[in-house]
Image (tube, grey):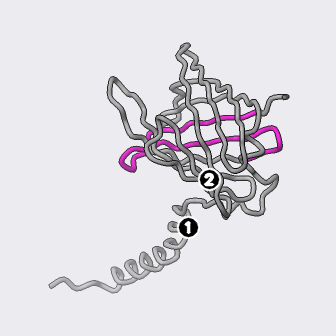
């Protein structure tokens, strides 16, 4: 049986004390933000107002190390009737490739939104508060002749009535694949 010397006991005690102090900091540092964290921020984001009319976005896709993989622009047109909207997105990538995604969005109670698109598995779920929206969904992405189900944790932040910034983290099986960064600009009617 091993016995601990006084010196070993002191070191273990100091280590336990340090871990006890660090644990709350480590746990807090790992906590993800929630829309409620932005509830007091202005201007208030209302998708029905912001995504109504024509918009232009510029974006990049990065790998998990931050290397830019793709650059693109998106021309969008949004239309709403009551609490249901359509957002028609036309992507043009730097290599000339083009894509279209048409979202059907529905505003629910308490800042909640849902959305559907042809290449989204199931239904996207969103929660808005203050100037922010957190949008989570699974996108069906074609990769080398196969289709991957990639999860998006998408955050949008309204800067002013014309500009919104968007950061989406992409993951698969809980492993971070990269990010999509976008800047939206409302266009004159």
SS type, badge 1: helix
Between disc 2 and disc 1, whose residue precedes?
A: 1
Q: Nearer the viewer, mark 2 or mark 1?
A: 2
Secondary element at image label 2? strand
Q: In the image, residue 184 lies at what x, y percent?
A: 72, 35
- Residue drawn at point x = 54 percent, y = 31 percent: 61
Q: Which mark is residue 91?
A: none
In the displayed structure image, the side of residue 55 where residue 124 appears, left or right: left
Question: What's the distance in space between the residues labelled 2 and 1, CA to CA?
Answer: 28 Å
Residue receiving disc 1: 28
173 or 88: nearer the eye? 88
Q: Which residue is mark 2?
A: 113
122 sits left or right of 42 in the view:
left
In this rendering, the answer to whether 18 lies above or below 91 is below
Q: Does residue 160 show up magenta in the picture? A: yes
- Which is nearer the eye, 102 or 4? 102
Horizontal side of residue 41 vs 106, given as left or right:
right
Neighbour tally class for label 2: few under 14, some 14-19, many 20 plus, Cα within 10 Å: many
Category of crowding for the residue at label 1, using alpha-carbon neighbours closer than 10 angstroms: few (below 14), some (14–19), many (at least 20): few
Chain part drawn in magenta: 158-185
């Amino acid at each position: 049986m091993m016995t601990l010397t006084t010196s070993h006991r002191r070191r273990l005690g100091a280590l336990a004390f340090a871990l006890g102090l660090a644990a709350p900091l480590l746990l807090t540092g790992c906590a993800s933000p929630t829309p409620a964290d932005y509830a007091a921020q202005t201007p208030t984001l209302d998708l029905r107002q912001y995504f109504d009319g024509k918009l232009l976005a510029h974006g990049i896709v990065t790998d998990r190390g931050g290397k830019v993989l793709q650059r693109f622009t998106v021309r969008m047109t949004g239309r709403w009737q009551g609490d249901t909207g359509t957002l028609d997105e036309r992507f043009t990538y730097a290599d000339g490739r083009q894509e279209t995604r048409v979202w059907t969005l529905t505003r629910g109670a308490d800042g909640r939104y849902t959305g559907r698109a042809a290449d989204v598995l199931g239904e996207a779920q969103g929660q808005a508060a203050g100037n922010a929206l957190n949008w989570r969904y699974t996108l069906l992405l074609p990769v080398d002749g196969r289709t991957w189900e990639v999860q998006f944790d998408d955050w949008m932040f309204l800067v002013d009535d014309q500009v919104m910034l968007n950061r989406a983290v992409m993951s698969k099986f809980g492993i971070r694949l990269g990010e999509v960064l976008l800047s939206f600009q409302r266009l004159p009617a």
